[in-house]
Image (tube, rainbow, N blue to C red):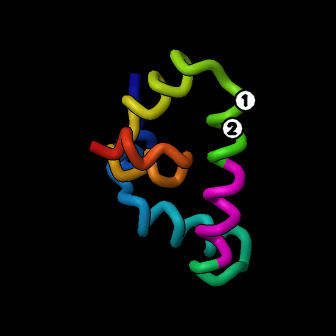
Amino acid sequence: MINDAEAAARDWGVRTFVAHVAEATGEDEESAEVATRAVLSTLADRIGRGERDALLSGLPAEHANLFGYPELAG
């Protein structure tokens, strides 16, 4: 069962997600976005294509850019 926090997290756009990362890390949003892209693109490179596609299919399309796959952004 999905709780309210999980449902809300799935609805975050990229800007909101990056803002939350910035707040959690104490960085400005530009630095947080650079770090987020580095982490998520590394993750995408380390998992299999099927796992990557399954992960991205569960997120809003715009998040594909953060993972380094803008062609999947829709």
Queried whether the magenta region covers residue 5, the answer comes back as no
Quadrant of image for the C terminus: top left
Give 22 or 53, whichever is nearer the viewer: 53
Q: Secondary structure at mark 2?
A: helix
Q: Amino acid at mark 1?
A: Arg
Q: Look at mark 1 in the image and give the residue it sits on.
A: 46
19 relative position to 4: left or right: right
Range of magenta residues: 31-39
Residue sitting at x 70%, y 50%:
39
Where residue 50 sits: x, y (%)?
52, 16
Q: Secondary structure at mark 1?
A: helix
Circle 2 crowding by C-alpha within 10 Å: few under 14, some 14–19, many from 20: few
To which quarter of the image does residue 30 belong?
Answer: bottom right
Queried whether the magenta region covers residue 38, the answer comes back as yes
Name above or below for residue 23 compared with residue 41.
below
Where residue 51 sits: x, y (%)?
55, 20
Residue sitting at x 46%, y 52%:
65
Where residue 55 sits: x, y (%)?
49, 29
Q: Residue furthest left?
A: 74
To which quarter of the image does residue 23 belong?
Answer: bottom right
Q: Amino acid at mark 2?
A: Leu
Residue sitting at x 35%, y 52%:
62
Mark 1 and 2 residues: CB-CB less than 8 Å, in contact? yes
Q: Look at mark 2 in the image and give the residue it sits on.
A: 43
